Image (cartoon, coloured by chain):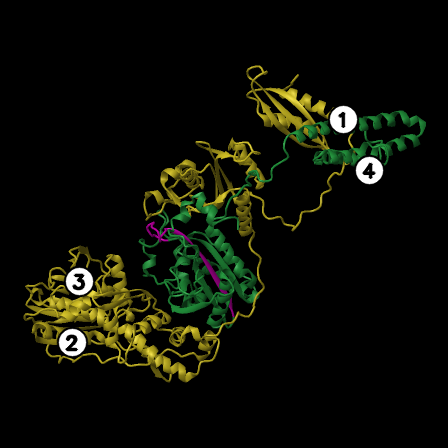
Chain colours: A yellow, B green
């Protein structure tokens, strides 16, 4: 909220420097978001927390500073009007508007004073050169109490404050026709609603240059009712903000008087009548001042006299049964609220510092958390970059990989269609990220993400933690020792194996990009034992034998290996294809595989037994379609 | 060849032979190896000849054949290696200044790395990790946190709701984890005891992704990260919050770091506060990052509001505690001076490699 420093200084009965204001307000809970000079006036942008409607004016901010500094506020330039016979009937039908002060005046000629125009301009508020409007705005920013002026000649009969009836409409000052509900608090005359209570006036009764007579409104409206109306109609106004957070009901008559006095002074208006209906609601019951609680929160005892002094400065009346909060503080209700006020005004800087006493045993980090941490570190060490992408994607992106319908995973109010589905797979986001990196000239793209994906189910989206990984490009070839080669899907399978995945399927995403997605639940947890149980390993020498096999070009390696393993003994510690050859010297439709078997036992193996095993492996390979290459 | 007739130390020497052979980088080394295996005296071959001499007559034939096979294998390999070394000697020896192969070099995401550092900072104080779902109920995201029914944050212009399940939303902060954990710790078991009573207290961190309906721009994102913390015990006050956070900030930003506490307002804490730390970039002297003030805002915190404890069935007259929450992106941008929030979600490998590293 914008605060003009000179107007703030005018509310305090003691000098206040800019430095004081900017140093004190943040330490009271109101950070300064910025400061600028406008036409010689310093304007501070003060951040007011949502609980403090009373701070939304120069007077409110000054009141807070006066409590902190222990100096008085200047007296309000207020002369109470003599109330007399109502010029028009005003009825309050509902308790949500307990008090309504009004007056009618006939306007003369005159302009908004320069000082007021400059004040409004500094705050970025428009100057309308309509005395009733400019004066009402000035009062709102200066004292925090919203008021309104109707063109009295456009009103029909008695005024009622009530809830709207079904089917009623209101065209508000912004020209929007609004359908009213039974929860909307309206000011109505005999023609129907003429204003939204506390939010905005109506177009039909607004003050214009042609207006000769005005009826003033200065009331109090229930904060919650106003907040709900503002939300329902998406109508956020200065008045709504102040009534919505809680205005001071005792200000209703005062603001009416101040408004009338401005009209009289600015344009020679003459008062026809002033009257009010209803009554200012009684102050709330006293709140217990819990000295023990305050000491517990502060970490030290604060003397009762100091507590009473601090609360009194904030406007509380101290009674035997507790502190009665001032009418402008709608946020004080329980002893904790008072404790906070005492500590806040005293300053958090004064509080001691201590570590809390240890009251419970620490707990270990959860296996799921550790699993993700270790996976991320492992993958980073394997050359992959961890990514973070949005959890929602477009329907097209989602449809490419998701296995459940998007319907149960759709946002009702997305930022846009491209961010509307809670993703069923990590691959679309990773693919898009990989494409971005490819376009930007990355020679090799290695990305992964650890995040939940969602499946549609009756009770709502069901989350599952996943690892997604994409890989493309060329690896090696950037030094004399390593050969350049394109990333191959088997590279991806090798990573999955390294992470302990029992099975995986590599997705070919096009343009040499390969993807992999694994459920974290399917990956092995951190070992139950810190170190696995000991397994003896052979200290005897191992022997390797190679078999060069001719196989049809469409032969699957897996079935051949399976056939060979079936006949090989436990002593066969490894069996792998170490080379594939196609081309010159082979018949068309054939390829050659070099299969290496390694044998090791708990004794030194004889060449005869090794040769025997190799022979039987060859027989098995032949039965699976291979021939020994001559 | 059949090594079963030979003593185990010879079998072992044979097993080690190929490795030792490959390790010979020059002819001198090779000659030493040759001496050890096939030399006239003191070699493995010499030992085998002694063995043969001492063997009973009927075994000599078979043993002799095995020994010969072994010696021949060694001699042949030594000859091959000698030829290799001789030819290598003609070419230049290796150049240590030549471009070496690149090791695989990936990176953790900088946000993950920062959250990891926060966890490390709090771990010595005994905080563990609690996590909750991203798809939450309004009850956990708002009601349990004392956020009024008409609070603007509940509106569809601030919070994402599911189309088919309007009671479900994407959590707008990590604080619903508080609600879940407190409910678990507040629930009475068969003996009428709660977990909180059994354990005597509670402290945890809750890192995670959160969502708010903000348009994407250099300082806003509809998804971002928070790391939240909470402690519950008896007699807990603001001084404990100050002590804990000051310690953690020194652990995170360095031993000279100062912390400053200002009042603030969040519905789920009372008293509420915000914490500034002395600017990690200029050390408090004043710079562009701290806008000359020497301080940067780092997190919101406060004592747990009694309504939050009572909502979880925990007696606020007995138990008290504090909670705090930090915006991860905000802090990451501040300490790294990253100019645009979108860089964290664009995931350019050049950014990730430079900002995340291997930690």
Q: Residue furthest top?
A: A587
- Numbered tag placed on residue B76 in the rendering: 1
Q: Quadrant of residue B150?
A: bottom left
Residue B51: give x, y in percent of width and height. Answer: 89, 33
- Numbered tag placed on residue A126 in the rendering: 3
Q: Quadrant of residue A141?
A: bottom left
The quarter in which the C terminus of chain A is drawn is top right
Q: Quadrant of residue A359?
A: bottom right
Question: Which residue matches tag 2?
Answer: A257
The answer for how far apart the CA atoms under marks 3 and 4 are is 100 Å
Q: Is residue B175 visible?
A: no
Q: Chain of mark 3?
A: A
Does B224 lie within the magenta span?
A: yes
The lab-note entry on whether marks 3 and 4 share a chain reads: no
Q: Earlier in the sequence, mark 4 or mark 1?
A: 4
| Foreground tag (3 vs 4) | 4
Q: Which residues are magenta?
A: B212-233
The one nearer the camera, A292 or B138, is A292
The answer for how far apart the CA atoms under marks 1 and 2 are is 117 Å
Q: Residues within 10 Å of mark 3 (few under 14, many from 20)?
A: few
Query: Mark 3: which secondary structure?
Result: loop
Question: Which residue matches tag 4?
Answer: B9
As drawn, is A272 to the left or to the right of A93? Answer: left
The quarter in which the N terminus of chain A is drawn is bottom left
The answer for how far apart the CA atoms under marks 4 and 1 are is 21 Å
Q: Residues within 10 Å of mark 1 (few under 14, many from 20)?
A: few
The answer for how far apart the CA atoms under marks 1 and 3 are is 101 Å
The lab-note entry on whether marks 1 and 2 share a chain reads: no
Query: Mark 4: which secondary structure?
Result: helix
């Amino acid at each position: 909220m914008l605060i003009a420093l000179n107007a703030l200084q005018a509310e305090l009965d003691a000098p206040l420097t800019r430095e004081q204001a900017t140093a004190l307000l943040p330490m009271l809970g109101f950070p300064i978001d910025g400061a600028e000079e406008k036409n010689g006036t310093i304007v501070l942008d003060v951040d007011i927390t949502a609980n403090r409607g009373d701070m939304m004016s120069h007077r409110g901010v000054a009141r807070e500073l006066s409590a902190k500094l222990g100096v008085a506020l200047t007296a309000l330039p207020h002369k109470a009007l003599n109330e007399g016979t109502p010029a028009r009937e005003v009825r309050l039908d509902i308790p949500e508007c307990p008090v309504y002060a009004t007056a009618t005046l006939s306007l003369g000629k005159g302009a908004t004073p320069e000082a007021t125009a400059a004040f409004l301009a500094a705050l970025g508020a428009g100057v309308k050169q309509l005395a009733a409007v400019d004066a009402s705005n000035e009062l709102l920013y200066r004292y925090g109490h919203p008021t309104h002026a109707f063109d009295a000649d456009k009103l029909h009969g008695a005024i009622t404050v009530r809830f709207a009836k079904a089917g009623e409409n209101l065209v508000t000052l912004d020209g929007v026709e609004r359908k009213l509900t039974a929860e909307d608090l309206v000011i109505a005359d005999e023609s129907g609603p003429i204003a939204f209570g506390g939010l905005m006036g109506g177009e039909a009764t607004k003050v214009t240059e042609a207006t000769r007579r005005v009826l003033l409104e200065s009331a109090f409206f229930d904060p919650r009712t106003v907040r709900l109306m503002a939300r329902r109609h998406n109508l956020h106004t200065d008045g709504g903000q102040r009534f919505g957070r809680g205005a001071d009901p005792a200000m209703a008559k005062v603001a009416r008087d101040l408004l009338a006095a401005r009209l009289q002074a600015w344009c020679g208006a003459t008062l026809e009548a002033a009257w009010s209906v209803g009554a200012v609601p009684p102050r709330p019951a006293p709140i217990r001042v819990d000295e023990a609680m305050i000491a517990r929160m502060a970490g030290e005892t604060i003397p009762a006299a100091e507590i009473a002094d601090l609360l009194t400065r904030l406007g509380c009346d101290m009674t035997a049964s507790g502190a009665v909060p001032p009418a402008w503080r709608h946020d004080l209700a329980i002893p904790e609220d008072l404790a906070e006020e005492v500590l806040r005004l005293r300053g958090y800087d004064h509080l001691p510092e201590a570590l809390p006493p240890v009251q419970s045993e620490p707990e270990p980090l959860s296996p799921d958390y550790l699993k993700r941490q270790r996976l991320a570190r492992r993958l980073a060490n394997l050359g992959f970059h961890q990514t973070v992408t949005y959890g929602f994607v477009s329907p097209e992106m989602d449809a490419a990989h998701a296995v459940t319908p998007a319907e149960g995973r759709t946002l009702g109010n997305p930022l846009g269609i491209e961010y509307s589905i809670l993703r069923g797979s990590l691959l679309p986001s990773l693919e898009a990220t990989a494409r971005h990196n490819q376009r930007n000239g990355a020679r090799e793209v290695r990305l992964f993400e650890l995040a939940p994906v969602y499946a549609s189910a009756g009770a709502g989206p069901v989350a599952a933690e996943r690892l997604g990984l994409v890989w493309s490009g060329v690896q090696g070839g950037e030094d004399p020792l390593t050969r350049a080669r394109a990333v191959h899907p088997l590279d991806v399978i090798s990573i999955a194996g390294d992470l302990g995945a029992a099975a995986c399927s590599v997705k070919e995403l096009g343009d040499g990009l390969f993807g992999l997605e694994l459920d974290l639940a399917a990956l092995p947890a951190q070992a139950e034992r810190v170190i696995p149980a000991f397994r003896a390993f052979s200290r005897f020498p191992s022997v390797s034998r190679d078999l060069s096999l001719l196989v049809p070009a469409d032969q699957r390696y897996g079935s051949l290996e399976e056939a060979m393993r079936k006949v090989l003994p436990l002593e066969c510690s490894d069996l792998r294809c170490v080379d594939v050859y196609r081309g010159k010297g082979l018949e068309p439709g054939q390829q050659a595989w070099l299969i290496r078997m390694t044998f090791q036992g708990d004794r030194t193996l004889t060449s005869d037994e090794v040769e025997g095993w190799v022979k039987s492996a060859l027989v098995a390979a032949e039965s699976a379609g291979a021939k020994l290459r001559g | 060849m059949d090594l079963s007739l030979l003593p185990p130390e010879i079998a072992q020497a044979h097993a080690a032979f190929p490795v030792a052979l490959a390790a010979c980088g020059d002819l001198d080394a090779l000659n030493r190896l040759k001496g050890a295996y096939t030399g006239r005296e003191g070699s493995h071959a010499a030992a085998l000849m002694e063995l043969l001499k001492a063997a009973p007559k009927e075994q000599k034939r078979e043993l002799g054949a095995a020994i010969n096979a072994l010696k021949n294998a060694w001699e042949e390999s030594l000859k091959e290696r000698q030829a290799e070394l001789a030819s290598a000697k003609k070419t230049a020896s290796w150049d240590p200044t030549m471009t070496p192969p690149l090791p695989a070099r990936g990176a953790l995401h900088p946000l993950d790395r920062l959250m990891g550092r926060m966890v490390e900072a709090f771990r010595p104080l005994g905080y563990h990790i609690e996590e909750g779902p991203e798809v939450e109920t309004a009850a956990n995201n708002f009601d349990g946190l004392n956020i009024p029914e008409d609070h603007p944050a509940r509106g569809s212009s601030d919070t994402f709701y599911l189309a088919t399940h309007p009671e479900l939303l994407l959590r707008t902060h990590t604080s619903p984890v508080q609600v879940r954990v407190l409910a678990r710790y507040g629930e009475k078991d068969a003996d009428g005891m709660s977990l909180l009573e059994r354990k005597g207290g509670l402290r945890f961190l809750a890192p995670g992704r959160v969502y708010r309906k903000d348009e994407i721009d250099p300082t806003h994102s509809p998804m971002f990260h928070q790391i939240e913390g909470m402690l519950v015990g008896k007699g807990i006050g603001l001084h404990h919050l100050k002590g804990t956070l000051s310690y953690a900030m020194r652990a995170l930003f360095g031993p000279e770091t100062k912390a400053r506490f200002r009042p603030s307002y969040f519905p789920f804490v009372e008293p509420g506060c915000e914490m500034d730390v002395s600017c990690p970039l200029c050390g408090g002297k004043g710079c562009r990052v701290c806008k000359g003030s020497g301080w940067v805002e780092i997190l919101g915190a406060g004592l747990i509001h009694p309504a939050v404890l009572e909502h979880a069935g925990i007696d606020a007259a007995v138990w008290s505690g504090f909670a705090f929450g930090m915006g991860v992106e905000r802090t990451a941008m501040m300490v790294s001076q990253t100019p645009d929030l979108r860089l964290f979600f664009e995931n350019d490998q050049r950014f990730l490699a430079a900002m995340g590293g291997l930690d």
